[in-house]
Amino acid sequence: MSAAVSLRDVHKRFGEVEVLKGVSFDVAPGEVVAVIGRSGSGKSTALRCVNRLETIQSGEIEVHGRRVDDPQLDLRALRRDVGMVFQSYNLFPHLTVAENITLAPRRVRKTPQAEARHIAVEALARVGLSDKIDAYPEQLSGGQQQRVAIARSLAMEPKVMLFDEVTSALDPHLTGEVLKVMEALAKGGMTMLVVTHEMAFARRVADRVIFMHTGKVWETGAGEMLANPQTPELREFLANGL
Ligand code: ADP
Ligand code: MG
């Protein structure tokens, strides 16, 4: 079967600085891949290249067989298929949870209001927040707001979800509820590429772990690789973090 996401020898520079130095990996449909590594190793850049928030200098990136680096690419179609959730959830404070979730479907998909409401109901059920549909963001905890951000992404029915350190801004006691939602999505068959510092999550939930170091895929394997690192760099990262 062809990959959901495929990177082939991807090179990305910011000015003179090469940030991705020939990155290659695949994510199969339904697979959950965790990306770990030190701050500055290129994790976010790799993710941002997948939904073309960044353009690459050379190599190939495909999402479900579509070349992301093709200048003719339909960006809106790509962004519809590839959902992304960031550390900062950026909900609109003056809109209710339902309005935040349905904004994009209504604008992009021209979904009628009644149907949009139904989409919000379904998306909120998936993140366990059905009772907050008419709340405003400020009435929610950080963890709940992040779950709404995930629901907002799900409302577009993405084929692939990218998560970039979505729990990093949360207090430890709020992190768990977000990881639980992500684990449920994973179990439900969502294709997920997850940059995370949560090693327990990477080990337990991910089908595969990619350790990035200095702009390269340094080591990759099943979750057990975290218990048995093969390179000094991964050993060092696991011992000291960041
Ligand atoms: P990570 O997510 O692993 O912490 P990033 O992908 O954010 O790493 O960053 C990798 C490197 O690229 C860092 O050295 C960072 O400073 C640099 N970088 C990221 N984005 C930009 C940008 N827009 N302009 C210039 N340099 C950038
Ligand atoms: Mg990052």
Image (tube, rainbow, N blue to C red):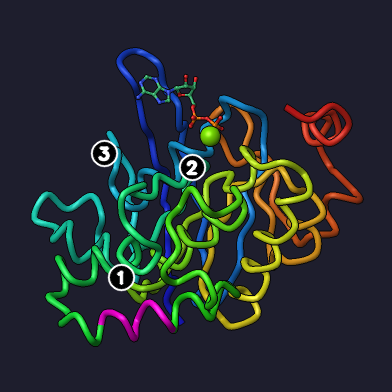
Q: CA distance from mark 1 to mark 2?
A: 18 Å
Mark 3 or 1, nearer chain start: 3
Q: Could you say which disc has been placed on residue 55 in the image? A: 3
- Within the magenta stretch, is there residue 38? no
Residue type for callout 1? Gly
- The one of 184 and 212 positioned closer to us in this rendering: 184
Which SS does the magenta portion mostly show? helix
Q: Residues in magenta?
A: 116-121
Q: CA distance from mark 3 to mark 1?
A: 18 Å
Q: Position of residue 19 (x, y in %)?
A: 45, 26
The CB of the residue at mark 1 lies under 8 Å from ligand 1: no
Tell me which corner region of the image, top left, top right, bottom left or bottom right, holds residue 179: bottom right
Q: Position of residue 79 (x, y in %)?
A: 27, 60
- Within the magenta stretch, is there residue 118? yes
Question: Which SS class for mark 3?
Answer: loop
Residue type for callout 3? Thr
Residue type for callout 2? Val
Q: Could you say which disc has been placed on residue 65 in the image? A: 1
The CB of the residue at mark 2 lies under 8 Å from ligand 1: no
Residue at 8% from the left image edge and 55% from the top image edge: 72
Q: Position of residue 187 (x, y in %)?
A: 65, 80
Relative side of 224 to 198, left or right: right
- Quickly name the residue at label 2: 23
- The one of 176 and 56 positioned closer to us in this rendering: 176
Mark 1 or 2, nearer chain start: 2
- The one of 113 and 196 positioned closer to us in this rendering: 113
Q: Residues within 10 Å of mark 3 (few under 14, many from 20)?
A: some
